Amino acid sequence: MSESLETPLHDWHVRRGGKMVDFSGWHMPVQYSGLVHEHTAVRERAGLFDVSHMGEIRLRGADALASIQRFTVNDASVLQEGQAQYTAMTNQAGGIIDDLLVYRMGTEDYLLVVNAGTRAKDYEWIARQAGPDVELVDESAEWAQLALQGPVAERVLGEVLDADVTGIGYYRFARIEYGGDPAIVSRTGYTGEDGFEVYLRPAHAERLADAILEAGAADQVVPAGLGARDTLRLEAGMLLYGNDMDEERTPVEAGLSWIVKNDKGEFIGRQALVQQKENGSPDKLVGLEVIGRGIPRHGYPVLSADGSPIGAVTSGTFSPTLKKGIGLAYIETAASALETEVAVEIRGRSVPARIVKPPFYRRQR
């Protein structure tokens, strides 16, 4: 078995008491002070995440945009310089190869941010689909990435960076310098809260992490691990690749039809997705709220009122914010009406639940 990879902040996590686990081949902190404490800090104040395991792939050249249009489902032609877009790459059958962010860095310059566990697969797929006049580079080793998420994130980050982060709109970014080197500050996020990601050279990652926690000390900003990141994203109804979507599921089934722009022209998987949009899909990703006690977990069966199996849970947890079990599940479309009462089989018990529309949590704006 190969050793886990380490981010530039690995030793920083260990010094701060992070409980380290393997995640997608990386040695990452699952928690520091406790999952619920970190989760609550992000909802009420802010939490700092290391997401340096994510992959960054650069496309430059005259064919860069045409290539992205061909292998992603969203319409990248609408992007302005300084803007980001959520999208997905699909195969010919419409199955999701990965979900990703596209950053328009310049006229013929794009940065793709992909999932850690799919980086090698993604790069090979992109290399096969890219046009002849494209410079394709895996820049993952050149970037560390920190995410500061929560209500005080804007103020704290503004104290640390020599940049006006208040002027960065949602799904926008700014190119800055940190430590004399190029850096990027974006406003996206994976928690349901306002927040930012800072992409910077690995040598400066510890300095920035320390500066953020020092600036946020009065607000009790804390380092947060993968455990809180997962409960936060699930409350916000955000999907996790490998759990809630994969190459066997399409964006239509996964509730991501809004990112599929069939009218932009041909792209890989378009025909299958057009047919599924027109004819419907046999299964559908829905939200589940448990009624009473019980926590749905990945793989648990979902049952109809008469006890017949109609699907399975893909992600589930106990929601620290809502104080109840919540989850996502693929179930038969015919049985997917909102407020339908179903059951989740939890360790041999049939636990009542109802179908709801994600997200489970929306922040006050």
Image (spheres, grey):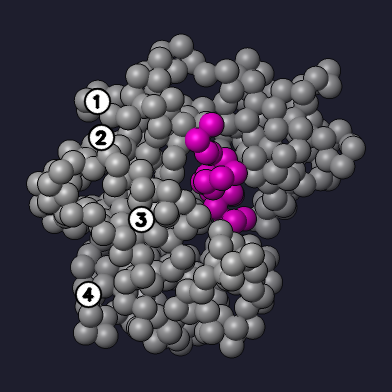
Whether residue 104 is visible here, answered yes or no, is: yes
Residue 312 in which image quadrant: top right
- Of callouts 4 and 2, the N-terminal one: 2
Q: Foreground residue, 304 or 289? A: 304
Is residue 54 shown left or right of residue 284?
A: left
What's the residue at 40%, 20% (across, down)?
A: 272
How far across and how far down the image is residue 115, in percent? 45, 54
- Of callouts 4 and 1, the N-terminal one: 4
Q: Nearer the viewer, mark 4 or mark 1?
A: 1
Is residue 15 shown left or right of residue 95?
A: right
- Say which element carries label 2: helix
Magenta stretch: give its range: 230-248
Q: CA distance from mark 1 to mark 3?
A: 23 Å
Q: Foreground residue, 342 or 264? A: 264
Q: CA distance from mark 2 to mark 3?
A: 17 Å
Do the residues under discs 2 and 3 have CB atoms within 8 angstroms?
A: no
- Of callouts 1 and 2, the N-terminal one: 2
State the mark number for residue 113.
3
Please state which amino acid type lies under the numbered disc 1.
Glu
The residue tagged 1 is 266
